[in-house]
Image: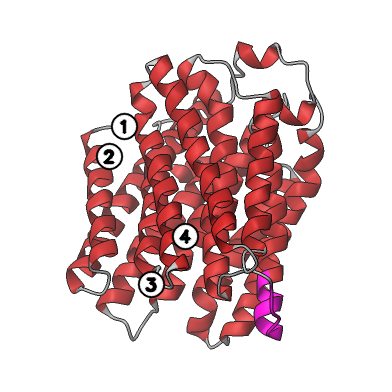
Amino acid sequence: MSNPSPAFKEYNGPILFERGYRPFFLGAALFAGVAIPFWVISLKMGLDIPTGFSGRNYHIHEMIFGYLGAVLAGFLFTAMPNWTGQPALAGIRLGLLSALWLAGRIAILTSASWPITAAVIDATYLVIVGSLAWRDVVIGGSVRNMPVCFIVSLLAVANISYHVLHLQSLDTAWIERAALGLIAVLISLVGGRVVPNFSGNWMRKNKLTPLPAAFSTFDKVVIASTIVTVISWVAIPEERVTGYLFACLFIGHATRLFRWRGWKTMTEPLVFILHMGYLWLVLWFGLSGLALLVPDIFSNSNALHALTSGAVGTMTMAIMTRAILGHSGRKLHAGGATQLIYALITAGALIRVFAESFGLDYMMTLSISGTLWAAGFILFALVYGPYCFSKN
């Protein structure tokens, strides 16, 4: 994502809508920084909010389809011109898509008054994101990136299914697992590109060897096994066979991460944080296996937050900081403020996943972890927000 497409240079409209990362990364960070404390406070104080969702479902839906939906659009519509050679989504089209995402957040928050209309507004967003991505990939003949489009489309289907189930007062747990499983597969795919590629570039520049292992049959087996494990988790989430699959994937993804030699990048946090983000995915597989096979030791809920608070939070922040620095012409280096952002996100995730195991009660865990995690995103908006409104 570091080499701008020539299509970007021809744009002369409002700078905020020049590239996909500008409105969507900033919007995602502000939303996460506000929505998490809002949810924790409303839960702690028993406040009624005008959403048609329960507090739990509001939190889950908005982090998966709201926050991550914005990050996905920012990533896709910044990378797509380089992937496909097609003109960048910019100007009024990007502005309208950003407005639709924001309308979805308002619609879900106020959905108690207009549930069906709110569902349609929200669900339309990912459908359009997927359609635009498919258009560029097909026209550009970018076969390699079709799996990413498949996942975005499946996430759009998952969101529609979530709304259908919710409107009929049916259980949404399985579709939540399906959406989260798709995210795990997406991190496996995209992480398998960006982590070794960016690490390798940095290591070559600093004359460090050996370089990260190249993508091979081993990686294909791990990704295929991830898909099988996710399907098992969706279909039979409490069976021991699913636990054994998680345990095997823990070993597979840990080996994959080791082959990328992340310890060599520790002197540059902008690169090392990518490895930390993928490490959280490894931990999710391991902790989920532990929760299923030895449930008295660890809970499924805490294990799941290794994927959400940990892998999603860290990996998206790693991608957002790097993309903004690279595309705004700034040095690819994590300064003190950026390192603090990473530390806050990591600390929030660690407390959310492990604090209850050491005796901290649930609400205190949510309060502390939510505050730290949200602070990281607010700091990101303060530091990187101005870059989204400037040409350099």
Q: Are marks 1 and 2 in contact (CB under 8 Å)?
A: yes
Span highlighted in magenta in the image: 39-49
Measuring from the top left, give residue 258's x and y in whole percent: 36, 47
**In front of the other: 5 or 293:** 5
Sequence-first tag of 1 and 3 = 3
Q: In which quarter of the image is residue 326?
A: top right
C-alpha span from label 4 to label 2: 35 Å
State the residue position of label 3: 171
Most frequent secondary structure within the magenta stretch: helix
Q: What residue type is labelled 2?
A: Asp
Q: Is 181 placed above or below 198 here?
A: below
284 or 65: nearer the viewer: 65
Residue at mark 4 to residue at mark 3: CA–CA distance: 11 Å
- Label 4: state its secondary structure: helix
- Dot in front, 4 or 1: 4
Asked if the magenta segment contains residue 47, the reply would be yes
Question: Residue 5, image x and y in percent?
Answer: 59, 16
Label for residue 215?
1
Q: Which amino acid does label 1 sit on?
A: Phe
- Identify residue for label 2: 219
Q: What residue did someone put label 4 on?
A: 163
Residue 331 appears in the figure: yes
Q: How far apart are marks 1 and 2 (CA)?
A: 6 Å
> Which secondary structure, mark 3?
loop
Mark 4 or mark 3: which comes first in sequence?
Answer: 4
- Circles 4 and 3: CB atoms closer than 8 Å: no
Vertical arrangement, residue 373 with respect to residue 239, above or below: above
**Residue appearing at x 47%, y 66% in the figure:** 167
